[in-house]
Image (tube, grey):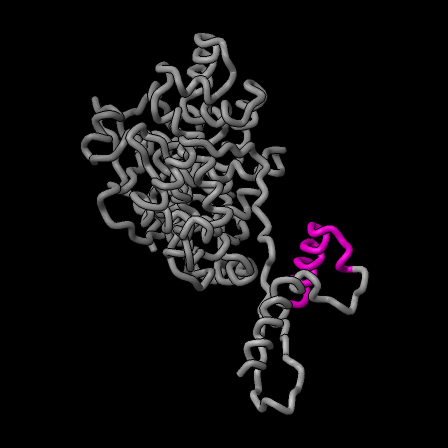
Amino acid sequence: MRYKLYSLGILFFLSTTCLSNVEAQNNFYSYLPMEKQISDYQESEIREGPRVVTIEPPISDESNDDFKLTFLLTDLRKKEPEFDIPIVINGKVEKYIQYFQTTLRDKFVTWLSRSEKYIPFMKNLLKEHGLPEDLVYLSLIESGFNPYAYSRAKAVGLWQFISRTGERYGLRVNWWVDERRDPEKSTIAAAKYLKDLYDLFACWYLAAAGYNAGEYKIMKAIKRYRTEDFWKLTNQRYLKRETKDYVPQMIAAALIAKDPEKYGFIDIEYQEPLRYEKVKVPELTDLGLIAKACETSLEEIKDLNPELRRGVTPPNENEYEIKIPYGKRDLFLKNLEALQPLEKFQFKTHHVKKGETLKGIAKTYRVDLEPLLEINHLTKKGSISNGMTLLIPISKDEEIRPLALVQKKNGKVRNARP
């Protein structure tokens, strides 16, 4: 018994003094600075996995106990995540860390689960435009990585563009498509906008605030209070609370997303990264046809092309670029050729009568004027004449059914019978 106690005392002493000298065979190792030891240990663990150290007492005639202690050495010092945007942790940031951990926890788990679907390619696009990759977390707080997100201010998509700003940075918004929902195009537009904001303010916190409130609002705040310090501006009354909270939310979201377990978010079921390739298809090609050609589900095609609002590619674009599942290109091209006739968006025809107007015709068929003009190559100031044939797109409340090809001959449009 005394020997056991004596042995345990020795083992306790050894365990507290010898763990940093695990590789006793390397005589020089114990003389390295601790940071170097940790670095070498982590490097080795990546290659070989965690190390197991077993300490056994000396053999004694007085005891037959099979006694040993085993230690599993994991990271002695966990590597902290790195950031390429400035990170300040203050009371405002801590408030939102706690908010995401508690009140908004369920939603934040959903946001994190979506994050890996979009973050990899978003970071690549931001990097290509010379921006910090961690600006990707703006999308997390803007939309929760949901391309269909819609705000009270009528902002749409992963990066929550309003129509005016979206169009300013090359995003089309019309009856057929809303490119604010396109993950790739909207990220490129966001990168361009953020770059312009940084060129204006030379500060990522002010650039982010400008992304939320608009650059002119931030410029007025700077002029009014004679400071370019974002945190000082948040102590004044001029900026809205939403803008004051925007940067703290971004920082809190980035901290949690890069080290979720540290903040209590464990076992997140991340979605697979978004992967696709692009093919060109004729105008008004039905997404159901594209799904058949890819031998996949309609839901998957819609998921890859959230910008298409009517279930078809837009008119007047004979080579519309659409996204299909990665690795399906050859299969798609092979099957598309065999699937004839092509399935198209449904139309009705209308023969214009004397005195009719485009607005009146649109009202009669309960359709928006814009698609009626677009599909018939007309403008609001354009005229229609008696006997003219117009294509009328089906009401958006009706079911989309496949039709034969729409043929255009001699400047007139008519339905082709199957």
Q: Is residue 250 left or right of residue 3?
A: left
Q: Is residue 412 left or right of residue 369?
A: right
x then y, percent, for residue 71:
58, 70
Query: How many numbered circles does the render carry?
Result: 0
Q: Is residue 72 above or below residue 373?
A: below
Task: Confirm whether the magenta stretch covers residue 33.
Answer: yes
Question: For the C terminus, which image quadrant?
Answer: bottom left
Task: Confirm whether the magenta stretch covers residue 108.
Answer: no
User: Residue 224, located in which quarter of the rendered image?
Assistant: top left
Q: Is residue 386 left or right of residue 27?
A: left
Q: Is residue 388 above or below residue 264?
A: above
Identify the residue at horizontal 81%, vertical 60% (top origin).
28
Q: Is residue 173 visible?
A: yes
Question: Toward the viewer: 104 or 131?
Answer: 104
x then y, percent, for residue 17:
65, 62
SS assignment for the magenta stretch, majority: helix
Task: Please give the range of residues in magenta.
Answer: 29-49
Identify the residue at horizontal 76%, vertical 54% (top origin).
32
x then y, percent, for residue 342:
41, 54
